């Protein structure tokens, strides 16, 4: 019967989404979990240490985040070739992405050695906060090539419709990170340097595992290991629009940190905790976006546009629902979660205010992250880049208003910063993505 067939199709679609999204959740939160672990361990050393790590982590996340195209351009490209039945070509694209990641990782690490202190100083860090930030930053540079290799390798596996392997690797990496960080910081008394060193070791361990997996798959399909430099350049070109899109996102986060830094070390410490929790929840919501990238790319490669529409509608509803659940959970935990990271009462008060407004914006965040993944999966990078710049133009005046007005105390100051970010900036992103998704043009862009 038609109704039975429709129900079976919906169940099959839901199963495919869950099969990719649930394991992807574990892999996506690896880096936020690293930062949460660092924050929890370092937070009990003192507010200057926590603020310094927060500032350094923001710069590192910005630099590495700009390279997210290594995963986001590889996933749909590999998925399209897989959908078209071209397995060897799919792995060749993945191989070229890994070579690009290695080259970029080395270049960025070397550049960071010379520019790190200037970047941290430009963001307003002074005194002890600056010294701790620089200490954490310089050691963490050694992990940048590993982070980029992990990013590119995850893109290959996601495109091959495999998110379970990244889950296993991420879980092992997080466990190693926790043990090493605690041992280095408290057992060996290395302070913030120990937190950075433990994370770097865990990151390189994860990169090594991924390289072994991809190399074995390439040999199975008789794909050479040396790069095709034309292919590397092709990955770079595809990723240029995604880099611009990511640049606008990171610019919004960086400018937010600058405004918060001017509010004092208490708000900077609280903001670091709030942003780390936001990143954790964002990656959780982004699990659906990763499923969207892989499934949309595969179905478009197979020419099945009807299923693309079904997938988009289903995942959008799931994103909204998941955002409601995470928002309620965040609201319930807003008054107590701060004790995990620090005993400072003033940091707790500012953090609670930020988390409450963040909780209100979670359904919107779920909607935004899913549609972002859908359009990335379709190869609609140019549109994402251009509207990303437009969203930033909308956000900056809101943030400027917060910066210019005397808000009286740290609690209200951080509250309005997060209101501008969670509701103003994310609202602009939701509007521009939603309008694009209503059309059908994005399904032909990457063909």
Image (tube, grey):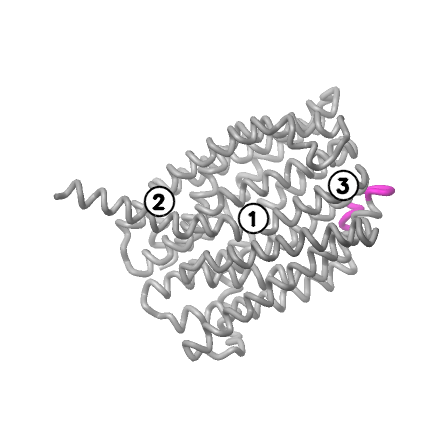
Per the model, the C-alpha gap separating discs 2 and 1 is: 23 Å
Residue where numbered disc 1 is placed: 29
Q: Mark 1 and mark 3 in contact (Cβ < 8 Å)?
A: no
Q: Main secondary structure of the magenta part?
A: helix
Labelled disc at residue 403: none
Residue 104, percent from left and from top = 63, 65
Disc 2 versus disc 1: nearer the observer: 1
For mark 3, does the 10 Å Cα neighbourhood hold few (<14), some (14 to 19), or many (20 or more) residues? Answer: many
- Location of residue 331 (image quadrant): top right
Q: Position of residue 52 (x, y in %)?
A: 78, 44
Residue at horizontal 77%, vertical 54%?
Answer: 184
Q: Which residues are magenta?
A: 118-129
Find residue 19 and report its horizontal and vertical position in percent. Answer: 39, 51
Q: Earlier in the sequence, mark 2 or mark 3?
A: 3
Residue 363, given in percent of the width and then of the height, sits at: 47, 32
In this picture, residue 136 sits left or right of residue 352 = right
Assign the N terminus to one quadrant of the image: top left
- Dot 2 or dot 1: first in sequence order is 1
Please tell me how crowded label 1 is: few (under 14), some (14-19), or many (20+) other residues with Cα within 10 Å.
Answer: many
Disc marking residue 312: 2
The disc at residue 50 is: 3
Sequence-wise, which precedes: disc 3 or disc 1?
1
Compute the Cα span from label 2 to label 3.
Answer: 40 Å
Residue found 38% across the figure and 56% down from its top: 297
Quadrant of image for the C terminus: bottom left
Q: Residues within 10 Å of mark 2 (few under 14, many from 20)?
A: many
Q: Nearer the viewer, mark 2 or mark 3?
A: 3
Find the distance from the CA under tag 3 to the CA under tag 1. 20 Å
- As drawn, the residue found furthest toward the top would be 408
């Amino acid at each position: 019967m038609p109704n039975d067939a429709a129900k079976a199709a919906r169940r099959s679609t839901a199963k495919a989404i869950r099969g990719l999204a649930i394991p992807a959740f574990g892999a996506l939160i690896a880096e936020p979990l690293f930062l949460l672990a660092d924050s929890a361990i370092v937070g009990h050393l003192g507010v200057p240490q926590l603020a310094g790590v927060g500032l350094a982590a923001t710069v590192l996340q910005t630099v590495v985040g700009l390279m997210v195209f290594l995963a986001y351009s590889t996933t749909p490209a590999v998925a399209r070739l897989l959908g078209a039945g071209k397995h060897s070509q799919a792995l060749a694209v993945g191989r070229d992405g890994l070579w690009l990641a290695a080259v970029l990782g080395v270049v960025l690490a070397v550049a960071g050695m010379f520019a790190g202190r200037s970047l941290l100083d430009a963001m307003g860090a002074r005194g002890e906060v600056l010294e701790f930030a620089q200490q954490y930053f310089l050691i963490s540079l050694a992990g940048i090539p590993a982070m980029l290799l992990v990013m590119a390798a995850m893109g290959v596996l996601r495109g091959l419709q495999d998110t379970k392997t990244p889950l296993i690797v991420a879980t092992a990496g997080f466990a190693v990170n926790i043990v090493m960080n605690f041992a280095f910081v408290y057992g060996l008394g290395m302070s913030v340097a120990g937190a950075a060193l433990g994370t770097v070791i865990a990151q390189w361990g994860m990169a090594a595992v991924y390289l072994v997996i991809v190399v074995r798959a390439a040999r199975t399909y008789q794909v050479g290991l040396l790069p095709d430099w034309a292919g590397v350049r092709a990955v770079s070109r595809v990723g240029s629009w995604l880099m611009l899109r990511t640049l606008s996102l990171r610019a919004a986060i960086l400018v937010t940190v600058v405004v918060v830094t001017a509010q004092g070390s208490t708000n900077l410490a609280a903001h670091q905790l709030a942003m780390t929790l936001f990143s954790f929840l964002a990656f959780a919501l982004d699990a659906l976006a990763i499923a969207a990238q892989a499934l949309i790319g595969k179905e478009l490669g197979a020419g099945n546009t009807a299923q693309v529409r079904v997938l988009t509608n289903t995942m959008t509803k799931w994103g909204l629902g998941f955002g409601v659940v995470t928002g309620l959970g965040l609201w319930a935990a807003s008054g107590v979660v701060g004790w995990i990271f620090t005993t400072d009462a003033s940091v707790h008060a500012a953090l609670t205010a930020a988390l409450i407004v963040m909780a209100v914006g979670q359904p919107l965040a779920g909607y935004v992250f899913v549609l972002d993944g859908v359009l990335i999966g379709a190869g609609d990078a140019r549109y994402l880049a251009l509207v990303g710049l437009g969203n930033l133009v909308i956000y900056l005046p809101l943030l400027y208003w917060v910066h210019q007005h005397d808000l009286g105390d740290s609690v209200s100051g951080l509250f309005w910063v997060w209101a501008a970010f969670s509701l103003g900036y994310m609202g602009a992103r939701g509007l521009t993505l939603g309008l694009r998704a209503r059309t059908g043009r994005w399904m032909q862009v990457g063909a």
